[in-house]
Amino acid sequence: MAKGFGGMGNLLKQAQEIQARMAQIQEELSRKTVEASAGGGMVRVTVNGQMALCSIQLDPTVVDPKEKDMLEDLVLAAVNEGLRRAREMVAEEMSKVTGGFKIPGLMP
């Protein structure tokens, strides 16, 4: 009977180690960023691994009051692409810890 608990103890220890490593990766991801652009680079955004929009850079040629709708569409497209890339980055980093095993609710 004690053998069964030993295996469970090892399993719990491994789970705690994975949890600690994942917390470390999440901290590292807050400092990692990805960039995305739209409109041939006229709108560029930077998103971090915590899915926060860090910056938006607009080419001066797109800042035209008559083209407001187009600019809004470009910003939206660039932000969505940045978020998609950030999710990919997070999934890649987390899979290093989990060995590719998908843990529900852990990875975006």
Image (tube, rainbow, N blue to C red):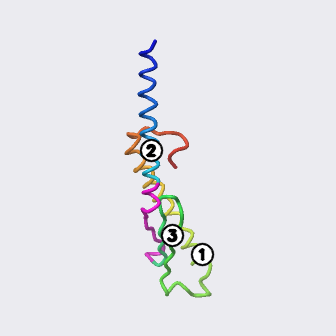
Q: Amino acid at mark 1?
A: Glu
Badge 3 crowding class, 10 Å Cα cut-off, few under 14, some 14 to 19, many 20 or more, is: few
At x 48%, y 63%, the residue is 48
Q: Which residue is mark 2?
A: 20
Tell me if label 1 and label 2 are in contact, CB under 8 Å.
Answer: no
Between 11 and 79, the one lying in front of the other is 11
Q: Disc 1 versus disc 3: distance between alpha carbons?
A: 17 Å
Q: Which residue is mark 1?
A: 72
75 within the magenta span: no
36 within the magenta span: yes
Q: Earlier in the sequence, mark 1 or mark 3?
A: 3
Q: Which residue is mark 3?
A: 54
Q: Amino acid at mark 2?
A: Ala
Q: Secondary structure at mark 2?
A: helix
Taking the image as shown, residue 33 lies to the left or right of residue 52, namely left
Q: Nearer the viewer, mark 3 or mark 2?
A: 2
Q: Secondary structure at mark 3?
A: strand
Could you say where residue 59 lies in the image, as x and y percent from the top left? 47, 83
Q: Disc 1 versus disc 2: distance between alpha carbons?
A: 41 Å
Badge 2 crowding class, 10 Å Cα cut-off, few under 14, some 14 to 19, many 20 or more, is: few
| Magenta span | 27-41
Badge 1 crowding class, 10 Å Cα cut-off, few under 14, some 14 to 19, many 20 or more, is: few
Which numbered dot is residue 10? none
At x 43%, y 51%, the residue is 24
Q: In the figure, residue 17 lies in which quadrant?
A: top left
Residue 61 lies, with reference to residue 93, above or below; the image says: below
Q: Amino acid at mark 3?
A: Cys
